[in-house]
Amino acid sequence: MLFDLSFIWAGIIAFAVLTYVVLDGFDLGVGILFPFATSERDRATMMNSIAPVWDGNETWLVLGGGGLFAVFPLAYAVIMPALYMPITLMLLALVFRGVAFEYRWRTTRWRGVWDSAFFGGSVVAATMQGIALGALVQGVEIEGRAYAGGWWDWLTLFSVLTGLAVLTGYALLGATWLNMKTEGELQCQMRGYARWLGAGTLAAIGLVSLLTPFQDPEYFRRWFNLPGSLFSLLVPGLVALCSYALFQGLKGTRDAQPFLAALGLFVLSFIGIGISFYPFIVPPGLTIAEAAAPDESLMFTLVGAAVLVPLILGYTAYAYWVFRGKINPEEGYH
């Protein structure tokens, strides 16, 4: 039963992380694009487009991190020292970003400082998330059920590449979100950015995908042997379909289509990472079953998750439904 519960919990945490990426990704993307707005009115519109949902999006980060601590304590104990610096920088960046979001509306003299904090926090948070992902993909050195690597093992050319890839991808999500939520000159500006960012994201996905199988022999074996090879054959077609939907949507009036297509690219990339990792939770030496908490703890927390996850999904969906449609530049969070 422990084996079954551990994999159920791995699925819940994977779902929480994916939900965080696709939801908080676009509002981090708005922050990344923030300095490129041509007027204070456009900057206010950009912030107002995410004002009702940005803090709720980060609920999923708390759920993923808290769930990892509660049900996979050994994985948490290994990952934290291995990724202490990028995770700390990410959290500090999110704090600065949140404070800037609140304070910029309450000052004129210091507004430029908080605008810079909002932009800087978004860039650092996105980049550190990508670097942490790259560090996990390349593998964590474990000895005697503890982290055995060095302080700077997380910082490599591959992790920097994944950091830049996530930064570009989040900017694409932000541009397509603003294309969906705004009108006029700001929408046209973001539509143009989305074309370039879409090309950059696809190039980054291709490069990371080519390099990932060479990070560990197990990845190579999994991707080029059944059943993983089936997904290897499907991926190019699915990515091409999302890419077509993205660029065609940017040409027409279906404003939601590019955003949904960009989300599709992230979901495909996440599935690919999952295939590479499975059944490891900390590759290459710690499996899901090995890292799991005792059976009683898994069952106790699963009961709580069965109540909380639907509630969080419900209020998240309700918030997006209430604030659906285009943003009125004359109204919003002030």
Image: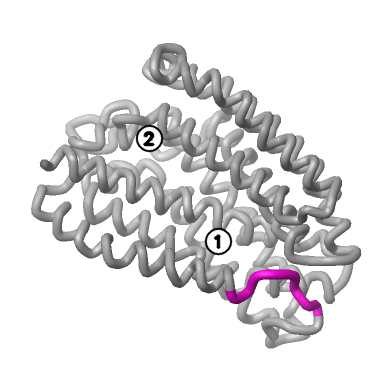
Residue 37: x, y in percent? 83, 64
User: Residue 157 lies in what quarter of the image?
Assistant: top right
Q: Decide: is 310 above or below 13.
A: below
Give the residue displayed 77% in from the left and 58% down from the top: 179
Label 1 amino acid?
Answer: Ala
Give the residue displayed 18% in from the left and 36% down from the top: 290
Q: Nearer the viewer, residue 292 or 249?
A: 249
Report the coloring of the rendering: one colour
Which residues make up the magenta segment?
A: 322-329
Residue 42: x, y in percent? 82, 70
Residue linked to disc 2:
150
Q: Nearer the viewer, residue 150 or 220?
A: 220
Q: How many marks?
A: 2
Measure the C-alpha gap from mark 2 to mark 1: 24 Å
Q: Decide: is 242 above or below 101.
A: above
Quarter of the picture containing the C terminus is bottom right
Label 2 amino acid?
Answer: Gly
Identify the main secondary structure in magenta.
Answer: loop
Residue linked to disc 1:
93
Within 10 angstroms of label 1, few (less than 14), some, or many (20 or more) residues?
many
Describe residue 312's horizontal placement relative to residue 326 as left or right: left
Q: Nearer the viewer, residue 113 or 244?
A: 244
The tag earlier along the polypeptide, 2 or 1, is 1
Describe residue 161's horizontal placement relative to residue 194 as left or right: left
Instruction: Give the SS element for disc 2.
Output: loop
Residue 134: x, y in percent? 50, 35
User: Residue 247 lies in what quarter of the image?
Assistant: top right
